[in-house]
Image (cartoon, grey):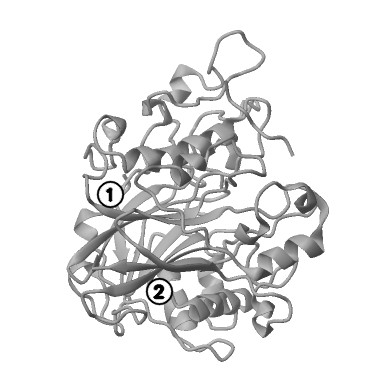
Amino acid sequence: MRRRTLTAATALAVALPTALLPLAASAHGHHGGHHGGHGPDRSLRVATYNLSLNRAAEGELQADLSTGDDPQARTVAEVIQRADPDVVLLNEFDHDAAHASVDLFRENYLEVPQGGADPVRYRYAYTAPSNTGIPSGVDLDNSGTVGGGNDAFGFGEFPGQYGMVVLSKYPIDTRNVRTFQHFLWKDMPGALLPDDPATPEPADWYSPAELDVVRLSSKSHWDVPVRVGRETVHVLAAHPTPPTFDGPEDRNGRRNHDEIRFWADYVTPGKASRYVYDDEGGRGGLKPGERFVILGDQNADPLDGDSVDAAIDQLLDHPRVTDPRPTSEGAVEASSLQGGANATHRGDPALDTADFADTAPGNLRADYVLPSRGLPVRDAGVFWPTQADPLSRLTGTYPFPSSDHRLVWVDLRVG
C-alpha cells in the first residue's frame, strides 16, 4: 500500500411515532446515562460504530429492519447493547427521507434483547441527508461520462447510502444543530485540491465549473449539541471518504485529509475557523470553552494504510483535543493471527479498530472518539473480544457477522 506524502438540506431530529415532544424527540424510556447517574459529576459513555448496515438498493434497509429477523441487524444491535453507550454515532446506516429505518432499528432491534443482552433505549435520535449518491451533474472522476456513484457528491449508488445517525439517551438540542453538507471544498483556505498529473497547471483535476459544485463532505459534517444535565456537549459527527479508489491525482486521499481538517479548524476559535459556513448560512466554528467530542470512522490511521501523511494527526495533535487511545486484546490477537500486511505495520495493533484485508491495508485504527480537553477521560476501549471470549461471535472473522469495524467507546466526566 502506498503511503501518501504531500510537499443544507433541512436537518431533522427523528422521533418514534408514539409520543412526539418538543424538539421532535420521542418519549420512549428513561434518558439518563446509567454509567454515572444523575449527580453533578456524572459519567457519559460516548461511542462510534461503523456498523456496515448499508444496503445495495434504496429501501432495502428499511425492508430488512421491518421485522426483527435480520441476522446482521440483530448482531450489531447486540454489540451496541453490550457496550451500552449513552450517545453513539452510527456510520454506514442508509438514510431515508421518512427516517423510518432509524425508528425500525430502535423498535425491532435495540429495544429487544439480543443474544441475552439487555435492551437499550435511545429516546432521542438525529439524522439528516447525506451527500452520498446525490448526482453532481458533472464528471468528477474524469471518466468521460457523467453518472454513477463516482460522479455523486459522495460515493453512493443512491441518495443516502452509507448515511449517519446519532442516537442519544440525553436530549438533543435540535434548534442549535449545524450541518455542513453543502460546504464547498474550494472554500476551505489552502484546500488540498487534486491535481491532474497530465497537465502543467496545479490543482486542476476539477474544472472551475466543477469546483463551483464540489462539496467537501463525502457524507456530511454535523454539530449535534447534546444536553447532559445543565451541560452541553457538541457531538461532531462525520465519516470522511476512504483515501483510496482513485488514481495519481489522489482526489480521495486529499479529500479525506481536508474532511478531517474541517473539524480541526472548526474547534479552533478565531481566524482558523472564520471561513466555515453551515447550511443555514451561519459562520464560524465553536466558541472558546465549548465542549465537544469528535466522532466517526475517519478512514485514517496515524502510521499505516493509505491516508495522506499526518491526516489524522490534525486531530490527534490538536491542542484542544484529547486522544484516549482506546485499545482491545482482540485487535492484538487478530493482528498476530492474520499476519500479512499487519506484520509490517508501524502502529500499535492494540489500537486497531477495523479488520481489513490481510494483504492490504491490514488492520487499522480508523474509528475515533476524541473529546475536548474540558471533558476528562475516565475509561476507553474497543469492542473487539479475543477468540476465547464467547462474545467474539459478534465480531468474528471474514465474512463478518456484524461489520469490519469495531465499536469504540470512551467514558467522560461531565459536570
Q: Quadrant of the N terminus?
A: top right
- Residue at the top extreme, as displayed: 200
- Residue 159, x across and y down, in percent: 48, 50
Q: Quadrant of the C terminus?
A: bottom left
Marks 2/1 in contact by CB < 8 Å: the verdict is no
Q: Residue at x 56, y 28 (%)?
A: 139
Q: Residue at x 48, y 44 (%)?
A: 134
Q: Is residue 324 above or below residue 179?
A: below
How many angstroms separate mark 2 from mark 1 (CA)? 22 Å
From where the camera sits, is residue 200 visible?
Answer: yes
**Label 1, residues with CA under 10 Å away: few <14, some 14-19, many ≥20:** many
Q: Quadrant of residue 315?
A: top left
- Residue 226, x across and y down, in percent: 27, 63
Q: Earlier in the sequence, mark 2 or mark 1?
A: 2
Task: Kindly identify the amino acid type of the residue bearing the numbered disc 2.
Answer: Asp
Q: How many marks?
A: 2
Query: Seen in the image, is 28 located left or right of residue 311?
Result: left
Front in this rendered view, residue 340 or 404: 340
| Disc 2 element | helix
Q: Which mark is residue 222?
A: none
Q: Residue at x 26, y 65 (%)?
A: 172
Residue at the spot of label 1:
178
Residue at the spot of label 2:
103
Q: Residue at x 23, y 52 (%)?
A: 290
**Label 2, residues with CA under 10 Å away: few <14, some 14-19, many ≥20:** many
- Residue 115, x across and y down, in percent: 59, 88
Front in this rendered view, residue 175 or 157: 175
Query: Seen in the image, is 254 located left or right of residue 413?
Result: right
